[in-house]
Image: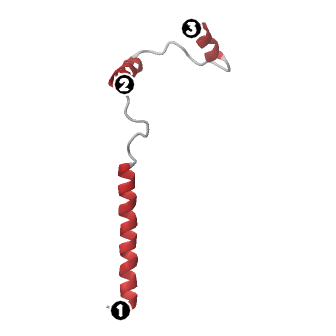
């Protein structure tokens, strides 16, 4: 094996290691840093998403006025 072929082989391996390292880091970091949400909270959020909104935005300050009335 010549020196150039050896260097090319090392560069290719280095590139593959870099790609694998990125994949592993992304897989490990795919978790929420703060932990998981409680099931009861998720259930409430899903229920609220199905409801029709009661407040609407109709211009500057309108939503704030509606929230203050609550």
Residue at image x 43%, y 36%? 34
Q: Hey, which quadrant is residue 47 in on the image? A: top left
Left or right of 64? Residue 3 is left
Q: Can you name the residue that lies furthest to the front here?
A: 34
Look at the picture and state if 65 lies above or below 16: above
Count the marks: how many?
3
Residue at mark 2: 42
Mark 2 and mark 3 lie on one chain; the one further toward the N terminus is 2
Q: Nearer the viewer, residue 6 or 56?
A: 6
Q: Can you name the residue that lies furthest to the bottom here?
A: 2
Q: Can you name the residue that lies furthest to the right here?
A: 60
Look at the picture and state if 36 lies above or below 58: below
Horizontal and vertical percent for residue 59? 65, 20
Q: The N terminus lies in which quarter of the figure?
A: bottom left
Residue at mark 3: 70
Look at the picture and state if 27 lies above or below 37: below
Residue at mark 1: 2
Mark 1 and mark 3 lie on one chain; the one further toward the N terminus is 1
Crowd band around label 1 with a 10 angstrom C-alpha radius: few (<14), some (14–19), many (20+): few
Q: Hey, which quadrant is residue 51 in on the image? A: top left
Q: Secondary structure at mark 3?
A: loop
- The numbered dot on residue 28 is none
Q: The C terminus lies in which quarter of the figure?
A: top right
Crowd band around label 3 with a 10 angstrom C-alpha radius: few (<14), some (14–19), many (20+): few
């Amino acid at each position: 094996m010549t020196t150039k072929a050896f260097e090319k082989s090392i560069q290719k391996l280095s590139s593959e290691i870099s790609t694998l390292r990125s994949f592993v880091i992304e897989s490990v970091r795919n978790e929420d840093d703060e932990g998981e949400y409680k099931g009861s909270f998720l259930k409430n959020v899903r229920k609220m998403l199905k409801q029709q909104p009661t407040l609407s935005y109709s211009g500057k300050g309108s939503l704030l006025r509606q929230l203050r009335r609550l």
